[in-house]
Image (spheres, rainbow, N blue to C red):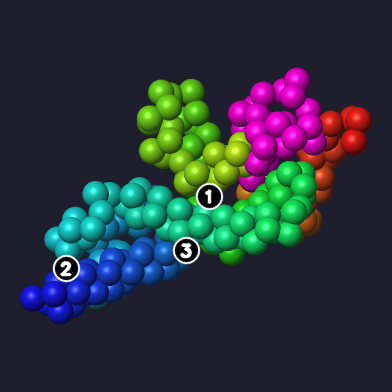
Amino acid sequence: MTEKISWRKQKKFQAQQKILLAAAQQFEVQGFANTSIADIMQAANLGVGTFYNYFDSKEEVLLTLSRNLREEVEKNISAASEVNQSSLELLELCCMCTAKLIDENRLILPLFISASEHSDKPEQISKSLSPGFRELFEEIILRGQASGEIRCDVPANIISEMIHSIYQTTAFSKLEISFQENIRLKIKILLDGIREKNL
């Protein structure tokens, strides 16, 4: 009986991964708005009805994809924390890891834009639409404020919102500079501005 349950779980996991992979490919090729659930399931070679065994909407698929990417950023941050990097160094690393992931996975840009558009909504709504990068920035900023590395006269949520908005503006930038370099320079200015001046 245990083997049967384990086999079923494995099959479910494989089907879910197939859907996520197909969705990522379709979002990249057609764009998020132009991709239908039918497109995703056709690419996954699964029936449309199967989709609803795993996800409620294509937005939920996009969130799952972006949260998987966030986990990659968190692993990098965790590894850097172990070598005692400062909060400012961790924040820069977090920002650049996020920039790299967005650059390589442009499909998550709609979530950044959506999260920003809903930032004035009740917390449960804006959180449900967010991939969670802003919260990750905020955690590091709060740590830096507590340790005296980051200035405390500006609230952490304002700083994290500023960082979050950099990715959106850069996505639509017409400057002849790469996405990641554009982010790097903007983040450098922002980090200089939030550094505690006594350091």
Is 42 in front, or is 187? 187
Location of residue 198 with respect to 86 vertically, above or below: above
> Residue 75 placed where, x, y %?
57, 60
Q: Amino acid at mark 3?
A: Glu
Secondary structure predominantly adopted by residues drawn in magenta = helix
Q: Amino acid at mark 2?
A: Gly
Residue under label 1: 109
Quadrant where the C terminus lies? top right
Residue under label 3: 28
Label 3 sits on a secondary structure element that is: helix
Which label number is shown at residue 47? 2
Is 158 in front, or is 46? 158
Chain part drawn in magenta = 140-169
Q: Is residue 163 magenta?
A: yes
Residue located 19% across and 74% down the image: 6
Is 142 in front, or is 187? 142
